[in-house]
Image (cartoon, helix red, strand yellow):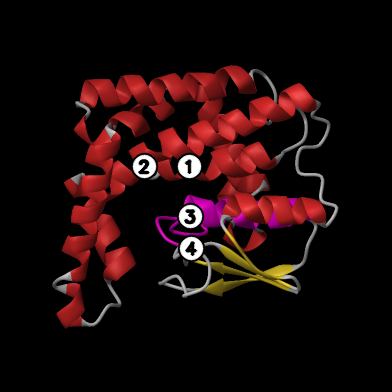
Amino acid sequence: MLKLMTFPAGFGEPSLSPFCVKAMILLDLSGQAWEPEWLMMPPSIGYGKLPILRTPDGPVPDSNFILAWLETQGADLFPGLDAGQRAQAHAIIRMVEEHLRLFLVNDRWVRDDGWAVLEPAVFGAMPRPLRLVVPGLARKGIRKTLQSQGIGKFSDAHAAQAAAADLDVLQQRLGEGPWLFGSRPSAVDAAALPVLSALDKLPGDTPARHALRERGSLMAYVTRGRAQLYPERFRTPTAAAA
């Protein structure tokens, strides 16, 4: 059985990391048997990040390399998509993970209301001497990264505008369908759903969360995705009935 090294559940999500949730969904879509290996810190293997999939071929780091490995095993994770649609799906995955997700990072790590929830969830089990120092240093590093990238400098109005542009792309692509590319979920849903769901569960009314909640079709998509794509152990009776 495959083992997925992943951050534990948090914020009502199957994992603290949307990339780990993405890997869980990909594994379920592939039909592979797997189980989680919960970790609070990434191991020395890989790129210092989670998720990492333990496979007969050795550890596979990064959710996108996990996707590629599953495809080598015969999984069809873009069912029914032609070459052009596959290219669109790739672009949407990159948009979600390299732009829209950064608003989630900012709102969790930089905003005080988000940090008040994140800090005990991530660092709560850390021994007291380290906890007095490490969380602040980690937060400072994230803030510096977001400042360098640019999103960390945005006003609330510009953050709302930038997040809304990404959300409009997703809403347009979704249309009236249940999933982003038609009647069957694909790898692009595995990438988009965890980011949208985590944005919805932010503790404060941030620009990104507000922009998401204004879009009814995307909120219905999030509800449907939680009920149908999240691993069964994380589906609540309410969500499953939605």
* Above or below, 71 relative to 219: below
Which residue is located at x 46 percent, y 24 percent?
166
Q: Which residue is mark 1?
A: 195
On screen, residue 22 versus residue 207, left or right, reads right
The reply to whether discs 4 and 3 touch (Cβ–Cβ < 8 Å) is no
Between the residue at mark 3 and the residue at mark 1, the CA separation in whole angstroms equals 10 Å
Between the residue at mark 4 and the residue at mark 3, the CA separation in whole angstroms equals 23 Å
| Mark 4 or 2, nearer chain start | 4
Q: Which mark is residue 13?
A: 3
Q: Which residue is mark 2?
A: 104
Can you see residue 203? no
Q: Which one is in front in this view, the residue at disc 3 or the one at disc 1?
A: 1
Q: Position of residue 222 (x, y in %)?
A: 55, 37
User: How crowded is the residue under tag 2: few (<14 C-alpha within 10 Å), some, or many (20+)?
Assistant: many
Circle 4: element type: loop
Which residue is located at x 77 percent, y 30 percent?
183
The reply to whether discs 1 and 2 touch (Cβ–Cβ < 8 Å) is yes
Point out the stretch of residues depicted in magenta. 9-30
Circle 3: element type: loop
Q: Which one is in front in this view, the residue at disc 4 or the one at disc 2?
A: 4
Between the residue at mark 4 and the residue at mark 1, the CA separation in whole angstroms equals 21 Å
Q: Position of residue 38 (x, y in %)?
A: 51, 73
The reply to whether discs 4 and 2 touch (Cβ–Cβ < 8 Å) is no
For badge 1, the amino acid type reads: Val
Which residue is located at x 24 percent, y 60 percent?
138
Between the residue at mark 2 and the residue at mark 3, the CA separation in whole angstroms equals 13 Å
